[in-house]
Image (cartoon, helix red, strand yellow):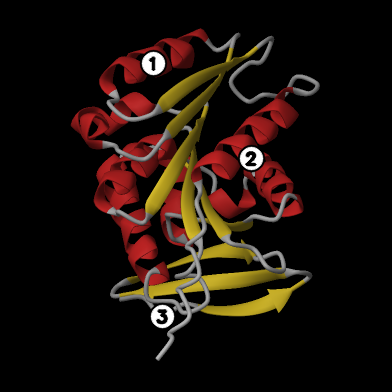
Amino acid sequence: MASPAGVTVSGLQYRKFNFSGFELAGDLRLPPGTERLVILVHGSGGGHSNPRNHYIAEYLARHGMGTLMLDLLTRTEQRWDNLTGVLRFDISLLADRLTRVIEAIAHDAELRPLALGLFGASTAAAAVLVAATRAATVQAVVSRGGRTDLAAQALRRVRAPTLQVVGAQDPVILHVNEQTCRALHCTQHLEVVKGATHLFKEPGALADVARLTGNWFEKYLHPNPCPPLHRP
């Protein structure tokens, strides 16, 4: 089991998750009174340094949701992946890492009560879907421009409501997401953002992704009800 520890900096807690043989890190933001937590991961370049993930996380935080922008690779692994592009396609590795963090959160007194959602971009979207099949605490999933096909046989086992967001001008990923729709057996939706390419750089495109993401988590992340008062 990991032992999370955080230090608050400008409203953020820099979180480390220490496992046997490696350490993962990310930025945790918990708005006052939040009842939801979304873990955001990216397939390459470091999840908590990805500018598009930052944009989504800030949007969610402004709407009262907690966010954990997480790196699934260590710094050394990220440097190697930047050179080779190999580890970002190791879905088994990424899913195992994310599953371990979810398990650590389940033992964290501060984070355990929060309704949990997962957000994945690029190849990490596949890791998110695989992890969702392993952790019953995951209530909803969102993919942005994701290689969701890389989740392969795990797709049929996904039960968490799943939203795929893809740009209309991103034909390869659009085709992939359409195939994923046919493989999923859960509540799902494919949202195509008009005029957007893979990185959603077009004016207003990323704002559309943030809005769609927030709406999905608002709908499907159900905060744990308070236990009834004991009456003798």
Relative image position of residue 143 (x, y in whole percent): 48, 33
Tag 3, which secondary structure?
loop
> In which quadrant will I find the C terminus?
bottom left
Q: Position of residue 135 (x, y in %)?
A: 30, 54
Q: For residue 3, which numbered disc appears in the image?
A: 3
**Secondary structure type for disc 1:** helix
Amino acid at circle 3: Ser
Q: Is residue 14 above or below residue 81?
A: below
User: Circles 2 and 3: CB distance less than 8 Å?
Assistant: no
- Position of 76 with respect to 48 (left or right) is left
In primary-sequence order, the first of circles 2 and 3 is: 3
Q: Do callouts 2 and 1 mark residues in contact (Cβ within 8 Å)?
A: no
Q: Position of residue 186 (x, y in %)?
A: 32, 30
For this orientation, the residue located farthest to the left is 153
First-in-chain label (2 vs 1): 1
Q: Of the residues shown, which amino acid type is indicated by label 1? A: Val
Name the residue carrying label 2.
214
Which residue position is annotated with label 1? Answer: 176
Q: In the image, what residue occupies the spot 42% across and 40% down?
A: 124
Circles 1 and 3 in contact, beta carbons < 8 Å? no
Question: Which label was assigned to residue 64?
Answer: none
Disc 2 residue crowd, few under 14, some 14–19, many 20+, Cα 10 Å: many
- Identify the residue at image location x=36%, y=56%: 137
Q: CA distance from mark 2 to mark 1?
A: 23 Å
Task: Measure how far apart labels 1 and 3 are at the Cα level.
Answer: 37 Å
Label located before the other in sequence (1 or 3): 3
Classify 10 Å Cα crowding around label 1: few (below 14), some (14-19), many (20 and above). Answer: some
Q: What secondary structure is found at the residue carrying circle 2?
A: helix
